[in-house]
Amino acid sequence: MRIVNHPILTFPQQDMVTFTLNGQKIEGVAGEPIAAALHAADIKVLRHSHERHRPRGLFCAIGNCSSCLMTVDGIPNIRVCIEPLRAGMVVETQEGKGKII
Amino acid sequence: MPSQERFAKGPIALFECMQQIPCNPCVDACSRGAITVKEINDCPSLNEELCNGCGVCMTHCPGLSIFVVDYTYGKDVALLKIPYEFSPLPEAKDVVDALNRHGERVGSAQVIRVQTSPNKTNIIWLSVPRELAMEVRSIRLQKGGHHES
Amino acid sequence: MITTEILVIGAGPAGLMAAIHAAEAGARVLLVERADRLGGQLIKQTHKFFGSKAEFAGERGMDIAEKLINWSSDVSGITIWKNAVVLGIYPDGVVTISHEGAFCTARPKKIIIATGASEKTMAFPNNDLPGIYGAGAVQTLMNVHGVLPAKRILMIGAGNIGVIVAYQLLQAGVEVAGIVEAAPQVGGYRVHAAKLQRHGVPIYTSHSIQLAHGDSCLEGVTISKLDEKWQPIAGSEQYIAVDGLCLAVGLSPLTELLWQAGCEMKFAGELGGYVPLRDANMKTTHENIYVAGDVSGVEEASAAMVEGKLAGLYVASVLGHKKDSFTKEFQTAKSQLAALRSGPASVKICTGLSKVVLEEVG
């Protein structure tokens, strides 16, 4: 969910762009981190761990911890908490270490 | 805590800042020089005669720990000014739930004025039953708004 | 190879102040920041800061960030690189940097490391479930990007970060189920805790989280009461249904570059973990490496700003850039820092500093 009214901050309406998550179309704000767009769409499971296939989500949101690795435009292990969203991005929930080729 | 005599003279600031932390913006906020913080970790001390209860210090306090009370406001009611940083703001004449320091409803208060501040720490002027003036420290809007619980 | 007099790594409160004051003294500075914006974690601080006027007290952290960012762009002599990650500091003085994805090398005369800190996590079953965040992550989502992290959140840790972020959650319209604190009392400033309590947020002191529940995402947590030896009391468990859990259990200095450069490090739990030994002028045991801010010990942002100023002024002076007002400004900054650390709230910090500062603090 996005914040509309806030006592201190203002969040002006911004242009939305479309991208896909596992083939499903989702809208987000261009330039915001992919993870923010996914959270706004209530999507929190970003990958599954490589040994026990446990769901993993966002933890630090500033590129420190690598909890949020996803496959973006075919490239695995993208920290989506700091990767800016662009129109048409193909985002996939990452399984394990991801496929390099 | 100011004396009964001082309360009888009109509005005055109340400092609920009892812990020694490095902080002194209230001193610079007061144009009357009524507030002193000797060493930056000292708690503020108020010159009760210089304070006129204007409430400017309330908007500057990072801890939102300053309130203003005026017992001369009415016969059965007191005027209480509280800092408020939530959205939406109440409007003048609204009746709101009056909450104590633990967030429990202790009665109703009427909003007298909403004084907005450029730094977004707004001041709500409330008319509260006299006996609740030292208890009420927050409000909850009675209808609408996403902060209701 | 880029040549510069001073390389400042990290553009948070400490790095910005260091760059500004070094450049104002006349030094040429390269300020590198790994993120795509300056200001570090200041940009998400919607609350008003403590301290005194000299540290911008009474102003909101995000407004202080804006001030420092504008100031840094107004000062001539600072080159700013965003999206610039420092990869290594080599024995010959060469620093490698990935800037906008391109590999660069720099050879600064002096380096000020102001890389800040990262959030700690906590061990409990299912602590990896989506919906469990560091407190800073929650701030980033709501205060920078305007996205709510959850509908109902439980906060772990009643230090300043815990109480501040819990209040910010309320302001954003999130229900705060409570704050859980293992210690018998609130560690953060009591005025911050009071702001939450008067809005009805319960603070569970002497409590800790036992485990998180949920299938693919967090659905709830079990907390229990702790005895005086901090052990969970059997039968005191309670389940709290939440879709968000926020961990505010401390920060660790981001010291990788200092280790790599061979600076002598020491463990000081009071300062968040391993920190570099350094003198009162912020110089490490490495002749050309200085530090400022949380990387030299986790503290409040107001202290980080003053440390940045000290480091910036001092390093510039070592390189021969000394303003007429140097002695006065430097001494004022030192007394500012000493004043900030003089109260009972700073006892822990001072204990930590006494282990790692090679001369007397202040």
Image (cartoon, grey):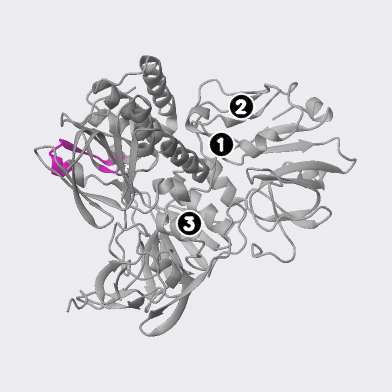
Question: Residue C140, image x and y in percent?
Answer: 44, 57
- In the rendered image, the residue lying farthest to the right is B75
Which residue is at a point 82% across and 36% down the rendered structure image?
Answer: B71
Q: Residue flagged by tag 1: what amino acid is it? A: Gly
Between circles 1 and 3, the one closer to the viewer is 3
Count of numbered labels shown in the rendering? 3
**Which is more foreground, mark 2 or mark 3?**
3
- Left/right of residue A74 with respect to residue C181 in the rendered view: left
Check disc 2 and report its element: helix, strand or loop. helix
Please report contact status of discs 2 and 1: CB closer than 8 Å, yes or no: yes
The CA span between labels 1 and 3 is: 21 Å
Question: Which residue is at the front of the view, C224 or A12?
Answer: A12
**Label 1 residue SS:** loop
Residue placed under numbered mark 3 in the picture? C144
Q: Amino acid at mark 2?
A: Asp
- Mark 2–mark 3 Cα distance, whole angstroms, equals 30 Å
Question: Is residue C236 visible to us here?
Answer: no
Q: Identify the residue at horizontal 64%, vertical 48% (top origin).
A: B101
For marks 1 and 3 on the same chain, the one whose residue lies earlier in the sequence: 1
Residue for badge 2: B28
Bounds of the magenta segment: C259-273
Q: In the rendered image, which quarter is residue C125 located in?
A: bottom left
Q: Residue at x 36, y 18 (%)?
A: C323
